[in-house]
Image (cartoon, helix red, strand yellow):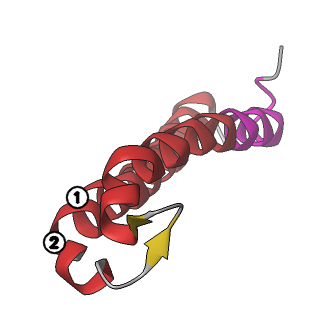
Amino acid sequence: MDDKEKAKAYWSANLRLIYGCLAVWATVSFGFGILLRPVLSGISVGGADLGFWFAQQGSILTFVFLIFFYAWKMNRLDQKFGLEE
């Protein structure tokens, strides 16, 4: 595999990871917090309904988790392609 093919494969894997993380974040923040809020309103978490919790706390915690997940996966991807620091 030459450098150009390697760079293209690396960038493709990076974009798949980014799109996956964005899809999870959009699902949690927009899907659970807004679209599914009426369905989740009967479930109580800490005195508030689950839809409200996802809108206020769940999306933020998911975002923080995704930051660490992305860094971990990128380190593994860098090692796979021989680009680690």
Tag shown at residue 14:
none
Q: Position of residue 22 (x, y in %)?
A: 37, 49
Residue depicted at 40% across the width and 57% down the height = 53
Q: Position of residue 8 (x, y in %)?
A: 48, 39
Can residue 23 be seen in this snapshot? no
Per the picture, the main secondary structure of the magenta-coloured stretch is helix
Above-or-below relation of 8 to 41: above
Q: Residues within 10 Å of mark 1 (few under 14, many from 20)?
A: some
Q: Position of residue 43 (x, y in %)?
A: 42, 81
Can residue 32 be seen in this snapshot? yes
Which is more N-terminal, label 2 or label 1? 1
Q: Is residue 74 left or right of residue 41?
A: right
Per the rendered image, the range of residues in magenta is 71-83
Q: Is residue 25 magenta?
A: no
- Looking at the figure, which quarter contains the N terminus? top right
- SS for tag 2? helix
- Looking at the figure, which quarter contains the C terminus? top right
Q: Is residue 75 left or right of residue 60?
A: right
- Whether residues under marks 1 and 2 lie with C-beta atoms below 8 angstroms apart, the answer is yes
Above-or-below relation of 15 to 24: above
Circle 1 residue: 30
Amino acid at pointer 2: Leu
Question: Nearest the camera: 8 or 62?
Answer: 62
Tell me the distance, in whole angstroms, between the alpha carbons under discs 1 and 2.
Answer: 7 Å
Residue depicted at 31% across the width and 59% down the height = 52
Q: Is residue 46 left or right of residue 28?
A: right
Residue depicted at 27% across the width and 61% down the height = 33
Q: Position of residue 24 (x, y in %)?
A: 42, 60
Question: Nearest the camera: 82 or 37?
Answer: 37
Circle 2 residue: 35
Amino acid at pointer 1: Phe
- SS for tag 1? helix
